[in-house]
């Protein structure tokens, strides 16, 4: 066994996006020594990609808005599968979190009277999204980064990969991993661990996620016995780029439609008139995504298999002012001037509603000492997420997780990591660098691609029992092959080796997605089953929970906490109550 | 534009990806030394011409035109040529100007000659932290002086509309006015002016006249974005004005006028 | 094959976008202390291909071990900085068909210590960042804050920075003169300008900008502005205004006489 570098802290935060940094700020403010670990450099996390804004019912633009309406919109958007207590906490606290961000030096667009400006977004009753142009996520991450740096108390470990959470007795006591820069092993002992590793989209071929979205956090939590919730719910964003091939999947913000963009098929018809004549292009994300999908399948797709998104009628001046990033993105990557040409778009994997099952108040997972916040946690968004609720989510529950982890750390002693466990983990992680058992070994990049097609084709936007089973078979086959992964080179910054680790996480999470999707035999929210096109009132009462059962993965239906009478009445506050109730 | 399902719209032909223009390609592929070489040539030519006109060129005046090199008309008959009393101020302004500093640091000092190109110099680099280059920080005082000179140039330009009490408008008048416009755009688009007008304010809502100062700052910012262009245009227009008046004075050309 | 699969698989097989041409890449390979070299790879060109696509092709098919940083591949995170044909650029934004015919060279950023291949050690940047006086809000300001749009409009540009460090890479003071200890570098003047001009910030960083920051070293040759992928006017809007503020304090006795009292009367505003 190789002697690792050993570090200790009260609270270990894994992930340095918005949720991770907010948790670290909370933990240091509570007086705990904190280590933040990230796979990349600080400030590069996926949060920077968020464009629309933070949904918070400040009522600066529409005075009728308040937390109750926000609660109702979010619950109805999630088809009431949400953890209602989480939604209640969220709608209440996100208001303070936005103001706090401003007090830390963050900037927002302003109303004429000097308040924070708010914009309209799909399925929000009022103008609610606090924003700054179309780069709100970058503003959020930079503000949190500056705040975290200013306190100077958290130790940020950049470019570390953690491979395993360590459990001692019934609780989590730390993590094992390696430094990407030189491949040296580290053991980080912690009294409490906060997972803030974000979502997973990289097991799909066409995704707006960065390479980091491999689901390491969910996979590690699953391995130590945490339960995963609602894994079948994966949000397709209706508009991603499709051409050129290298840009496929990159997000085209919903704000294009918000600013009045039209969707056309190859026959030049605004097809949303057929699918949702009332809300047209601004219908909910799942409806628009499915409509584009149906048009393509009916042979009315664009040359590269999508739809045209046209904003030209707003005029060049307006487009450049309101959608500067989109103008630049299409100009640089596709050489398309969106003021003169329509964009070609198709649905792309965007967000994962499911994740680690957590307690609403403390963000504690089902394993003591382990907390989860942000996209890696499940429950807030139910069957579908509303735009603008993710940036709020990471702030509200990032803070709560950090505080709860600090409380836990104060009342617990440091645990120990056994040499046997460390030795086994080192052998496992180093295996792809050793001589392969069979032949030349498997190329992790090619396994990743095979997995992507298996998920994209058979567990994507439209699902059937048959396709899902086919996907499951493929996953199991790839899992077998993955045991024989081999990469050349050493341990210094070896991306092939890093990919082996990613593939393992993605296989675990993919299996959870497919198994849960098989169980939910209905169409609800983002889950669209061609063999069960209707909603099933019985399944509306349950969440599907994935857990480790010995050596295999099991899924069980768990009835969720019913909405109390007085909370149910709040639902009437939403302007979409009538149509969503059905 | 299509507002309903019945209105049809023709999908575009697949045009392929647009390429950069020939000019952009030329600019990108031009060798890195081309720009510094041009700057050295043009600036040197200006200095040589300025020296020549100041010391040997004689007084350039042909009613109603007065060359910018000889304005204001103080010490018209003094012991040395009047240009020497006037020239130092605009020269000082240009020497400390943020744009010209870039131009000559790159072209004359080769510090750096171009971006991401190695530097030959091995001496310790001090930038603008030591004498004499740190004197560039006095740019704003040079600006005040340059504004005074500019006022005189405008007076000259207005005076050129008047020949012996009669309205006069010739090609020379137009050239003098254009020269003044270029010089004004250059002088008032200066970074120091921008700073004094609004750049130094942290919160416009909390200073007197803040909204106006912000508007002023925005206007100067628009000029300032093209500061390099105004710097070169005004340099050429000064020389052009001098040359034109010299040609009229010597009778080589006859000033067309109303 | 179900309905679900048809649409996507059709596209996959018929439209990989290959143009039929091959592009040659000469990529820096090596670690510190060992013999580094440029290795040539042949990559099939795909329509609209960017340099990062080619690096990914190489990693997947030719050389799994080639190290390179990247995250979003959409020019939003600023991770994939490198020098392509000698120009500091984001690889995800640099289209192959925009580059001249012939072999394309890809090298790591020269200013920072090499880790491996295209990856450099940029940790010093984070140290500089930590030493800057952070945002210090005015005291006794009632929340929620009232800020007018025109008070923050010019700050937006500074907040666009994605920390790709291309400006730090191209800056000759760091790149050629190695004044890493004396000079903060363009990125951090952008940050300081954003803090100094913040309407609610109460700290005064003028001395810090002059001494620790070493703003006098900048000779405004604007290479940082040229390479910025976010088109931030680093020199004109961040560095020069900071130089002017330093001049207010150290080179303008007249102005100082006039403004001293007002400054203390109005916290947060520089001289009026």
Image (spheres, coloured by chain):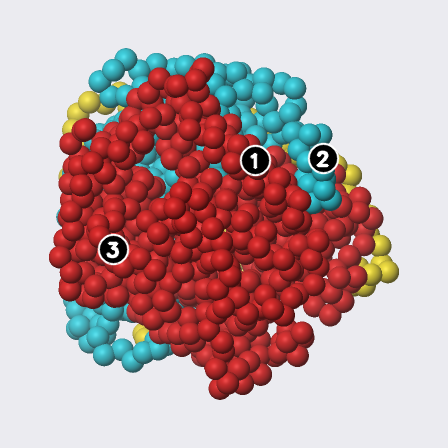
Chain colours: A red, B yellow, C cyan
Per the model, the C-alpha gap separating discs 1 and 3 is 34 Å
The residue closer to the viewer here, C261 or C209, is C209
**How crowded is the residue under tag 3: few (<14 C-alpha within 10 Å), some, or many (20+)?**
few
Kindly report the distance in space between the C-alpha atoms of the residues bearing marks 2 and 1. 20 Å
Percent of width and height locating residue C148: 41, 72
Name the chain letter of the residue that bears numbered label 1.
Answer: A
Residues marked 2 and 3, same chain: no
Do residues under tags 2 and 1 come within 8 Å of each other at their CB atoms? no
The nearer-to-camera label among 2 and 3 is 3
Q: Name the side, left or right, on which A30 lies relative to A452.
A: left
Residue identified by numbered label 1: A474
Instruction: Say which residue appears at 76% left-offset and 67% top-offset.
Output: A277
First in sequence, mark 1 or 3: give its number.
3
Measured in 3D between alpha carbons, the distance from the residue under mark 2 to the one under mark 3, in whole angstroms, is 50 Å
- Is residue A368 something one can see in this rendering? yes
Q: Are marks 2 and 3 in contact (CB under 8 Å)?
A: no
B155 left or right of C184?
right
Identify the residue at horizontal 72%, vertical 42% (top origin): C2
Residue identified by numbered label 3? A170
Element under label 2? helix
Determine crowd level at label 1: few under 14, some 14-19, many 20+ residues with C-alpha closer than 10 A.
some
Question: Which residue in the protein does label 2 denote?
Answer: C10
At 34% from the left and 33% from the top, the residue drawn is C170
- Could you tell whether B86 is left or right of A502 in the image? left
- Please tell me which residue is depicted at 39% across the width and 74% down the height of the picture: A89
């Amino acid at each position: 066994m190789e002697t690792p570098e050993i570090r200790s802290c009260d609270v270990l935060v894994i992930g340095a996006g918005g949720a991770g940094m907010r948790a670290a700020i909370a933990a240091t403010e509570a007086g705990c020594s904190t280590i933040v670990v990230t796979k990349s450099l600080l400030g590069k996390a996926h949060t920077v990609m968020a464009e629309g804004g933070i949904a918070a019912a400040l009522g600066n633009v529409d005075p009728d808005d308040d937390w109750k309406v926000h609660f109702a919109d979010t619950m109805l958007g999630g088809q009431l599968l949400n953890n209602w207590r989480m939604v209640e906490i969220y709608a209440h606290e996100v208001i303070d979190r936005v103001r706090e961000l401003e007090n830390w030096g963050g900037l927002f667009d302003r109303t004429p009277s000097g308040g924070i400006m708010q914009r309209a977004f799909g399925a929000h009753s009022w103008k609610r999204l606090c924003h700054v142009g179309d780069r709100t996520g970058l503003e959020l991450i930079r503000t949190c980064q500056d705040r975290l740096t200013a306190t100077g108390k958290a130790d940020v470990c950049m470019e570390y990969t953690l491979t395993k959470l360590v459990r001692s007795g019934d609780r989590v006591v730390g993590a094992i991993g390696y430094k990407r820069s030189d491949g040296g092993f580290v053991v980080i002992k912690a009294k409490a661990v906060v997972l803030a590793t974000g979502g997973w989209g990289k097991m799909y071929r066409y995704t707006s996620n960065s390479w980091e979205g491999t689901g390491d956090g969910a996979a590690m939590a699953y391995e130590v016995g945490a339960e995963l919730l609602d894994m079948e719910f994966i949000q397709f964003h209706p508009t991603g780029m499709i051409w050129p091939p290298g840009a496929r999947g990159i997000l085209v913000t919903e704000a294009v439609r918000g600013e009045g963009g039209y969707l056309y098929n190859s026959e030049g018809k605004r097809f949303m008139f057929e699918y949702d004549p009332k809300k047209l292009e601004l219908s909910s994300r799942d409806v628009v995504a499915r409509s584009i999908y149906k048009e393509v399948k009916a042979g009315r797709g664009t040359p590269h298999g999508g739809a045209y998104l046209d904003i030209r009628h707003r005029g060049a001046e307006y487009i450049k002012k309101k959608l500067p990033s989109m103008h630049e993105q299409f100009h640089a990557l596709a050489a398309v001037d969106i003021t003169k040409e329509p964009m070609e778009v198709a649905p792309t994997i965007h967000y994962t509603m499911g994740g680690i099952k957590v307690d609403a108040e403390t963000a504690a997972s089902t394993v003591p000492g382990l907390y989860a916040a942000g996209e890696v946690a499940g429950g807030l968004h139910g069957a579908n997420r509303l735009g603008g609720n993710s940036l709020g989510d990471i702030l509200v529950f990032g803070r709560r997780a950090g505080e709860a982890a600090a409380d836990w750390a104060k009342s617990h002693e440091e645990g120990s990591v056994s040499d046997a466990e460390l030795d086994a983990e080192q052998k496992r992680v180093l295996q792809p660098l050793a001589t392969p058992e069979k032949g030349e070994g498997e190329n992790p990049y090619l396994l990743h691609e095979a997995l992507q097609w298996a998920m994209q084709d058979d567990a994507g936007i439209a699902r059937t029992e048959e396709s899902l089973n086919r996907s499951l078979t493929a996953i199991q086959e790839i899992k077998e092959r993955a045991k024989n992964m081999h990469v050349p080179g050493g341990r210094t910054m070896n991306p092939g080796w890093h990919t082996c680790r990613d593939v393992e996480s993605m296989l675990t999470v993919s299996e959870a997605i497919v198994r849960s999707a098989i169980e939910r035999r209905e169409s609800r929210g983002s889950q669209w089953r061609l063999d069960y096109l209707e909603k099933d009132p019985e399944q509306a009462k349950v969440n599907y929970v994935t857990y480790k059962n010995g050596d295999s993965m099991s899924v069980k239906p768990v009835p969720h906490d019913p909405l109390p009478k007085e909370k149910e009445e709040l639902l009437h506050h939403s302007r979409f109550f009538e149509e969503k109730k059905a | 534009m299509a507002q309903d399902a019945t209105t049809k719209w023709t999908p575009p032909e697949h045009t392929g990806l647009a390429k950069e223009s020939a000019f952009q390609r030329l600019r990108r592929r031009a060798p890195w030394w081309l720009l510094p070489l041009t700057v050295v040539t043009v600036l040197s030519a200006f200095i040589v011409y300025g020296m020549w006109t100041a010391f040997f060129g004689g007084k350039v005046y042909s009613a109603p035109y007065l060359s910018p090199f000889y304005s204001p008309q103080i010490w018209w008959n003094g012991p040395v040529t009047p240009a020497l009393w006037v020239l130092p101020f605009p020269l000082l302004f240009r020497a400390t100007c943020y744009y010209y500093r870039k131009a000559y640091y790159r072209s004359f000092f080769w510090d750096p000659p171009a971006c991401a190109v190695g530097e030959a110099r091995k001496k310790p680099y001090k930038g603008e932290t030591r004498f004499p280059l740190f004197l560039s920080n006095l740019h704003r005082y040079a600006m005040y002086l340059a504004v005074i000179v500019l006022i005189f140039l405008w007076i000259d330009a207005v005076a050129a509309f008047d020949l012996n009490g009669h309205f006069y408008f010739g090609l020379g008048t137009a050239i003098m006015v254009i020269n003044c416009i270029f010089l004004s755009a250059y002088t008032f688009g200066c970074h120091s002016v921008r700073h004094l007008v609004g750049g130094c304010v942290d919160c416009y809502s909390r200073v007197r006249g803040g909204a106006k100062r912000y508007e002023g700052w925005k206007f100067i910012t628009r000029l300032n974005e093209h500061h390099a262009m105004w710097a070169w245009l005004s340099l050429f227009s000064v020389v052009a004005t001098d040359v034109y008046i010299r040609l009229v004075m010597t009778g080589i050309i006859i000033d067309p006028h109303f | 094959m179900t309905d679900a699969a048809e649409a996507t698989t059709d596209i996959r097989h018929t439209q990989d976008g290959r143009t039929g041409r091959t592009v040659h890449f000469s990529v820096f390979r090596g670690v510190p202390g060992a013999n580094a070299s440029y290795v040539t790879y042949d990559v099939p060109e795909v329509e609209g291909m960017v340099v990062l696509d080619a690096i990914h092709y190489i990693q997947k098919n030719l050389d799994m071990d080639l190290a390179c940083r990247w995250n979003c591949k959409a020019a939003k995170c600023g991770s994939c900085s490198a020098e392509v044909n000698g120009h500091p650029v984001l690889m995800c934004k640099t289209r192959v068909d925009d580059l001249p015919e012939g072999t394309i060279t890809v090298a790591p950023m020269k200013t920072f210590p090499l880790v491996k291949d295209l990856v450099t050690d940029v940790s010093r940047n984070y140290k500089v960042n930590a030493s800057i006086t952070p945002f210090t809000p005015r005291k006794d300001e009632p929340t929620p804050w009232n800020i007018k749009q025109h008070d923050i409009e010019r700050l937006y540009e500074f907040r666009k920075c994605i920390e790709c460090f291309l400006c730090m890479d191209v800056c000759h003071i760091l790149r050629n003169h190695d004044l890493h200890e004396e000079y903060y570098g363009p990125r951090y003047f952008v940050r300081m300008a954003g803090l100094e001009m913040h309407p609610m910030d109460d700290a005064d960083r003028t001395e810090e900008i002059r001494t620790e920051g070493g703003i006098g070293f900048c000779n405004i040759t604007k290479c940082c502005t040229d390479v910025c992928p976010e088109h931030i006017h680093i020199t004109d809007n961040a560095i020069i205004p900071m130089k002017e503020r330093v001049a207010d304090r150290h080179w303008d006795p007249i102005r100082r006489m006039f403004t001293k009292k007002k400054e203390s009367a109005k916290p947060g505003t520089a001289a009026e």
